[in-house]
Image: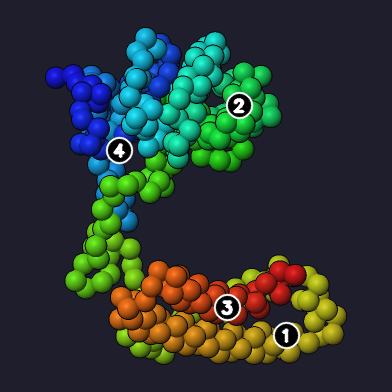
Amino acid sequence: MSHSCAEVPHILRTPYVLVAGGALVGKSRLCQGIIGLEEPPTDTCTSWTIRTKYYTAKVELREEHEDSVDTNITSSPPEALILVFNLAAPSTFEWVQSFIGRPGLETVEVKLLCGTHADALLTSDKNSDDLEAGLLPESFQNAADWSIQNGFEFIICCPMFPALDAVLAIDGSRQGIARVVEALHAHSWPNLDMVQPGPRGPCNGATHEARYDASRPVDDATTKALGHFLCLQARNASERRGSKHFGLHQQLGDEEQYEDGQQNECDAQASHAERVLDGLESLMEEMNGHKSRLATLSDDERREQAASLALRMLKVLEFGNEDSSSDED
């Protein structure tokens, strides 16, 4: 049975995504793709549970039709706003421009502008996966400029043709409904529930991220494996410098010396890897020790401790990358 979000008391409402646009621009198809339904939703307000490997959150997708005016936006603004227009009918963008002037939208954190019917941008010499923004029609350029001026991310999509939508890209940047979902997943929803790690720590299916265990010693095999990896990186860097080095050794008739030098470089990289791992292990152990003291610290003290640990982590990582950086230079 259809229902309106406005019928629900404000105190009981879950965060919602407002999907607004003129007539026949594809709002229902867009919502279908976002939620992953087999058919377009028949209700103006559809429940959706966002599930990532870090958190879950229950939200609602509400469609705003051209002839409907919601007077509750000011008192209960959306958490995310998706404005929709038809790329094949540039005049539908005028509705979007008029809608943005409504009060209550100033505090919205996630703002997306979606141009549907992206197939209208394709020609015989333009593929869906390698569109160039500078070569697209003036109507596209106007929408792109407007989105920048008003703090929106502009995404083209094609909900009517999922196979085409899945491969859309502009200047190498992913487009389509998948990019819309990514943007919504990246938001910190006020009612999110963090995914808790399992009793064993490492990931359980796709919902947990792997965690480093500082209490587990780093064995020789791990050190050697990382050393071998860094060694291969050093070899690749030398090969990129390429003919300059190897050609010099050929001129000197000293290929054996070249191979010895490469082996010495591998040994140095393995030793370097061991020092980096020691530094990371020491830092992780210290972070575990800080956990027991966090409850006794004020917010300012906790932030100061976190900043200090972050700086130390950065120094360790920079130490681990300084050789490769010098190679690139």
- The answer to whether marks 4 and 1 mark residues whose Cβ atoms lie closer than 8 Å is no
Residue position for label 3: 315
Residue 38: percent from left, percent from top? 24, 27
Q: Mark 2 points at which residue?
A: 146
Q: Which amino acid does label 4 sit on?
A: Pro
- Residue type at mark 3 is Lys
In the image, 115 versus 326, the foreground residue is 115
Q: Distance between the residues labelled 3 and 4?
A: 40 Å
Residue 109 location (% of width, % of height) = 45, 40
First in sequence, mark 3 or 1: give its number.
1
Q: Could you tell me how far apart the alpha carbons at marks 1 and 2 are, in whole angstroms? A: 59 Å
Q: Image check: 154 left or right of 4?
A: right
Q: Tag 2, which secondary structure?
A: helix
* Mark in the foreground, 3 or 4: 4
Residue, x 43% and y 14% (percent of image)? 22
Q: Nearer the viewer, residue 133 or 229?
A: 133
Instruction: Where is residue 198? Give x, y as percent.
Output: 21, 67
Q: How far apart are marks 3 and 1 (CA)?
A: 33 Å
Tag 1 residue:
258
Q: Nearer the viewer, mark 4 or mark 1?
A: 4
- Residue 139 appears anywhere in the view: yes
Disc 3 from disc 2: Cα separation = 41 Å
